[in-house]
Image: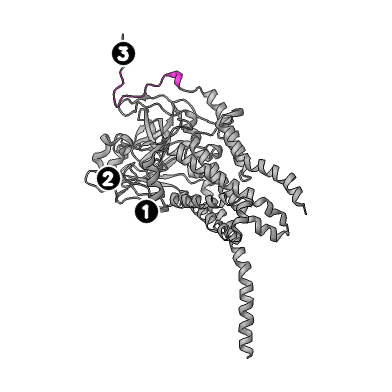
């Protein structure tokens, strides 16, 4: 008899039975939206939200076992109805409610800056040479909540290599699309639009850095950053820039949106660190989403549990200063 | 104008139920009645709902005196105590949600947060100050305290701004909603200040004019 033993670093063996069937979660989502809308109109403020029906399609991919956690992923419903995507509003339910009009197809990405391969490329052409892989990553939000999400994507390093960055390229900068007509959140200067993010070159080349195009085996729903987003699981969630339209190689540290908004609260690195608190709240513990009303906080791990993989990147750096 | 009896019999009971609605709505969602739910982060949903209604009801309480004067409606003052007590009720539930569900009675975290996180410190201070007001809200206490009752209950002029500040400080970037509260509270408190000023100014004017004449 074969006994499958779980080893650390092993993949999460999600049984087909554990995954909520599409019809069920779509129904649930409608109910949830109705509830959210009822709550919102109860405040007399919001109009009936435009439902963001998942126009998602199946992807073919292989699970990357080495880089997947064995923790149980959050439900598709949790992942797609509770998140931050300020371009669609600042509430956690806003992205799913307000992203219905967003068109992630066709999509082009501009490669620019200190690289040999530059220009505008169709997303399909960028992805074509790479095999998609699934990685079950922990996600830790700077607001002290966390999830486990099965992403599908390609290692950022592979895409970076194909761009042939020059010796001057020390950083990789990313930019989100600017479409106020489709992204109602961009009509208010809550943050400086468009959203920008960046990584140091060695962070971008780290095997954990993922350019995600899907989650739960399907293309990304609009609210989760369709059609292309960054996932860096050892950093706070806001580093995971969504709906990317530009990848630029730079010599200097690029500006990042939350750092522009409040530089004393959000640094360039934004590595998950339970010892360095946000100036206004503690980062020592987090609330795991999906465990119900009676789940109190659990301790946050250094680099969100990826210390073994990424701690070397920051050797000798004062993480209190470089937060 | 409704008489005291009409207010007591026909306005207060429906107002009581109205004030209870946010609590009922949380309970309905907590039990998932009729397909409702508290969403992916139920603790946050409960905590935010209670906190928001606590602040809203305290602001409404603060509005009773100005509204009475603007609309010449003295009966509004008879509703003030119930509104204030419901405000306290929700603030207390908000605190207990944080203590029991969010922190899970993890004392090292709780004590550090109260001492070290300014937004929690001021929220906690506001809650502590609400307690004597709730305790002295009975007719008996009003009689016993006499003139001092009014002085004591002026604490609410400090408590409500602290509550708004507490809200403003925990928002990440979108401060639009806290600013709405701030504006309303500024109007309600500013009006009280303004009401006191003209008399003083007028007196000052007269005195100055008299001095010039002499």
Q: Which residues are magenta?
A: A5-18
Magenta segment includes A232: no
Foreground pick, A279 / B119: B119
Image location (x, y in percent) of residue A107: 46, 38
Front of the two marks 2 and 1: 1
Label 3 element class: loop
Q: Measured from the top left, where is residue B53 in percent x and y?
A: 57, 45
Residue extending farthest to the top is A1
Instruction: Say few, some or many: other residues with alpha carbon within 10 Å of mark 3 (under 14 / 14 to 19 / 20 or more).
Output: few
When the figure is inspected, residue A60 is found, relative to residue B11, above or below; the finding is: above
Q: How many labels were placed on the picture?
A: 3
Task: Quarter of the image for the C terminus of chain B: give it.
Answer: bottom right
SS class of the residue under badge 2? Answer: loop
Q: Which residue is mark 2?
A: A166
The first of marks 3 and 2 along the sequence is 3
Is residue A295 found left or right of A36 in the rendered image? Answer: left
Callout 3: residue from which chain?
A
Of mark 3 and mark 1, the one earlier in the sequence is: 3
Q: Which residue is mark 1?
A: A264
Decide which of A258, A285 is in the foreground and name it: A285
Q: Identify residue for label 3.
A: A3
Disc 3 versus disc 2: distance between alpha carbons?
A: 49 Å
Q: State whether residue A259 appears in this view.
A: yes
In terms of secondary structure, where does tag 1 sit?
loop
Q: CA distance from mark 2 to mark 1?
A: 32 Å
Looking at the image, which residue sits at the far left?
A316
Marks 3,1: beta carbons within 8 A = no
Q: Main secondary structure of the magenta part?
A: loop
Between B47 and A232, the one lying in front of the other is B47
For mark 2, name the chain: A
- Above/below status of B205 relative to A260: below
């Amino acid at each position: 008899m074969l006994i499958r033993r779980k080893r650390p670093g092993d993949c999460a063996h999600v049984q087909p039975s554990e995954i909520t069937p599409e019809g069920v979660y779509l129904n649930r989502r409608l109910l949830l939206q109705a509830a959210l809308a009822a709550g919102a109109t109860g405040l007399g403020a919001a109009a009936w939200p435009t439902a963001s029906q998942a126009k998602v399609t199946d992807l073919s991919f292989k699970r990357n076992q080495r880089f997947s956690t064995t923790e149980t992923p959050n439900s598709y419903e949790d992942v797609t109805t509770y998140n931050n995507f300020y371009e669609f509003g600042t509430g956690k339910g806003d992205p799913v409610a307000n992203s219905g009009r967003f068109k992630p197809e066709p999509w082009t990405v501009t490669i620019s800056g200190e690289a040999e391969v530059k220009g505008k490329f169709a997303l399909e052409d960028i992805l074509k040479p790479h095999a998609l892989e699934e990685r079950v990553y922990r996600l830790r939000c700077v607001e002290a909540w966390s999830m486990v999400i099965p992403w599908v994507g390609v290692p950022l390093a592979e895409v970076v290599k194909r761009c042939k960055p020059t010796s001057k390229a020390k950083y990789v900068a990313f930019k989100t699309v600017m479409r106020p007509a489709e992204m109602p959140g961009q009509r208010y200067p809550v943050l400086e639009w468009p959203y920008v993010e960046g990584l140091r070159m060695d962070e971008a080349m780290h095997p954990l850095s993922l350019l995600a195009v899907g989650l739960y085996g399907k293309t990304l729903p609009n609210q989760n950053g369709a059609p292309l987003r960054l996932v860096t699981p050892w950093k706070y969630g806001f580093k995971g820039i969504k709906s990317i339209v530009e990848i630029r190689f730079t010599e200097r540290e690029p500006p990042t949106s939350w750092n522009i908004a409040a530089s004393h609260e959000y640094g360039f690195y934004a590595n998950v660190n339970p010892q360095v608190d946000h100036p206004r709240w503690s980062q020592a513990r987090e609330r795991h989403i999906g465990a119900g009303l009676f789940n109190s906080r659990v301790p946050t791990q250094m680099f969100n549990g990826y210390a073994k993989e990424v701690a070397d990147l920051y050797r000798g750096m004062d993480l209190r200063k470089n937060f | 104008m409704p008489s005291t009896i009409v207010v007591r019999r026909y306005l207060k009971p429906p107002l009581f139920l109205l004030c209870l609605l946010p609590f009922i709505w949380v309970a309905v969602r907590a039990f998932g009645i009729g397909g409702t739910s508290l969403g992916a982060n139920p603790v946050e949903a409960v905590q935010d709902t209670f906190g928001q209604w606590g602040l809203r009801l305290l602001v409404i309480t603060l509005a009773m005196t100005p509204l009475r004067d603007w609309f010449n409606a003295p009966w509004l003052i008879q509703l003030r105590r119930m509104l204030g007590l419901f405000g306290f009720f929700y603030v207390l539930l908000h605190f207990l949600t944080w203590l029991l569900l969010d922190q899970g009675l993890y004392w090292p975290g709780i004590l550090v947060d109260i001492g070290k996180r300014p937004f929690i410190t001021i929220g906690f201070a506001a809650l502590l100050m609400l307690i004597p007001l709730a305790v002295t809200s009975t007719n008996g206490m009003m009689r016993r305290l006499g003139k001092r009752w009014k002085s004591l209950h002026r604490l609410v002029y400090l408590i409500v701004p602290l509550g708004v500040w507490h809200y403003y400080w925990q928002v990440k970037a979108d401060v639009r909603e806290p600013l709405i509260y701030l504006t309303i509270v500024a109007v309600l408190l500013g009006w009280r200040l303004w009401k006191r000023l003209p008399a003083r100014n007028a007196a000052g004017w007269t005195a100055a004019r008299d001095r010039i004449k002499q």
